[in-house]
Amino acid sequence: MKQLRALLALIATYFLFRGAIHGRFRSILDPYSFSGDALQHIPPLWYAHERALFSLDYVREYYWNALFPPLFKATYWVVTFFAEPAAASKIISCALAFLFIATLTRASWVLAGRASAFVTLLLATGGTLKNFPFMSGLQRGFGTWLCAVMLLCIVEGNIVGLGVTITITALFYPAAAVFGLATLSLVLCLPQRFLGAGGAWTLKKRAVTLSIFAASTSLAVLPQLVAGTRYGQRLSIEHESEFEEWGPSGRYTQGDRGVPMSFTQKFLDNSMASLLPGKLTRVRHAAPDSEVNADEPSRNELLYRELFLTVVGSLLCAIVLARRASGHVSPEAARIGAYTVAIGASFAAATLVFPLLYIPTRYVVITLPALIPVVFPALWTRATAALLTFCSGRIKEASSAVVGVTALALLGWFSLTVKPMPTASGHRELFSYIRALPRESVIAGWPRGSIDTIALFTGRNVLLHEEAHQIFHRDFLLECRKRMRAIIKLYAATDRVALDELRRDYGVTHILIDRKHLKKNPAYFAPFKDEMDAARRGNATAMLYVERLVNEASVFRIQNLVLIDLSKALPLETTGAVNTSRE
């Protein structure tokens, strides 16, 4: 009977989200669909088995050594036996999605029963489908799932399991482990009756337990931290005066890499992402030539209004439960309260000591998607059951499920739509050509645009591309600046000097040119946009050398893209050792 109910729940979930599921699977089956973050994190994983076969590249080595935790690399080392990194990221994404949904459903079942678990199954599935690019086989995807495992341990009262999960998490995504330690600390401060399996623990045993897991977590992240020191001082927004990349026109947007964003704003945004489908059809869009009504609420205002009503309704459910319990707080509720408080505490600590504890907003992004799909259905269904004291258990359960599904329907989940992931399938011929090049090939080009996808889908080294152009450590930033300015010099040059420098200093073998950039200056973040404009102004009347290369040394063309083989250009005018990695 239990198996039949589970099967019916899965069938109902599929029926409700069949359009969104089909849309997601179309993206999964497209080998060239991706999320933006995949362009940054997945290309270095070509190194997993065959590092010696690729020319060593400073940028990829940096990611591999300083930014990838051990179990993250180990997981890809296993999966890339059977699939290339881009495909492996999709396999891992699907596995994480299923594990995430299953873990939350189990937590909801333990917390509030089968009706709550069914509503959680619907809410978690819809949220995962809607935010699937966030998973993308990245470290954050592992972190979000492991936060769900932490929540399950909290609901079950498994303190040791929580500590073990935290240590394992440090080997996948250290930021989530920091949050886990904050949660464990708060849980261990609760009175004995709230501690579940640790209810008989003395204060000394609690302190020893916390110390053991804090030490094991620290040891797990130590190798990655030590590796990062090889790339110089860790940078933050405090270095804005020194590096324009941190400024208003720089690399990062609000809430990213420590650029200030309030906890309340991020909390609300991620609550909306977890609870609301965000259908664009909820807002009437004016025709291009019609007048816009300034008094008409914006899409975000409508979504915040719905979120507010949802929260108020859920608080009323909590009040009903509190009255039925005569003010008695359940152990599960107390421990979930510790999880919730830990979100704010982690955010505050990361803000205070940034960048030592990574990006503050990550502590909201990875935790709320696990918390909300469990807590809200539990409140709705348990409050319903508490009001139906005169009914049998089965009627209570059925009524609770109906109330939960109705709440989701009112929020719009009955017609969930998902935004498709972008695809680079239009460049597959270019990818095929580049994949046939020798593995030691190095391709240069303007870092924003088509070249951003080459490292992911071909495994060949790219001198610099925007997604990899991050600003974490001083030496890495300076090397990216050096490479970017070498590209600007090439794009503004009227002779071959800049080309010879790229070949000699970086071993560049090919250049990818977008012909639109021959007539219009390409854009980039500060300070390089202004530098590019200034360099081109100085040579406004002369013919650009890259234009000559397009005419004389191109080996592949597709639409506006031209691939130039430098072996077909003139030989180097000066000799020197090729340097493909920065010492």
Image (cartoon, helix red, strand yellow):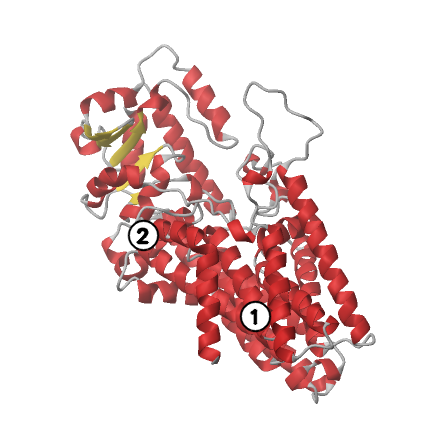
> As rendered, which of 128 and 552 lies closer to the eye?
128
User: Where is residue 37 shown, x and y percent of the image?
Assistant: 44, 48
Farthest residue to the top: give it.
541
Q: Is residue 360 visible?
A: no
**Is residue 321 placed above or below 129 in the rendered structure?**
below
Q: Residue at x 38, y 15 (%)?
A: 539
Label 2 packing within 10 angstroms: few (<14), some (14-19), many (20+): few
**Is residue 304 placed above or below 89 in the rendered structure?**
above
Q: Is residue 253 left or right of residue 517?
A: right
User: Where is residue 395 shown, x and y percent of the image?
Assistant: 63, 74
Farthest residue to the bottom: give it.
200
Q: Is residue 125 visible?
A: yes
> As rendered, which of 316 and 522 lies closer to the eye?
316
Q: Is residue 154 left or right of residue 324?
A: left
Q: Which mark is residue 117?
A: 1
Kind of residue at badge 2:
Leu
State which tag comes first along the sequence, 1 or 2. 2
* Residue 190, picture quadrant: bottom right
Q: Which residue is mark 2?
A: 29
Q: Is residue 561 left or right of residue 130?
A: left
Q: Secondary structure at mark 1?
A: helix
Calculate the distance from the C-alpha at mark 1 to the C-alpha at mark 2: 30 Å
Q: Secondary structure at mark 2?
A: helix
**Is residue 227 placed above or below 563 in the rendered structure?**
below
Kind of residue at badge 1:
Ala
In front of the other: label 1 or label 2?
1
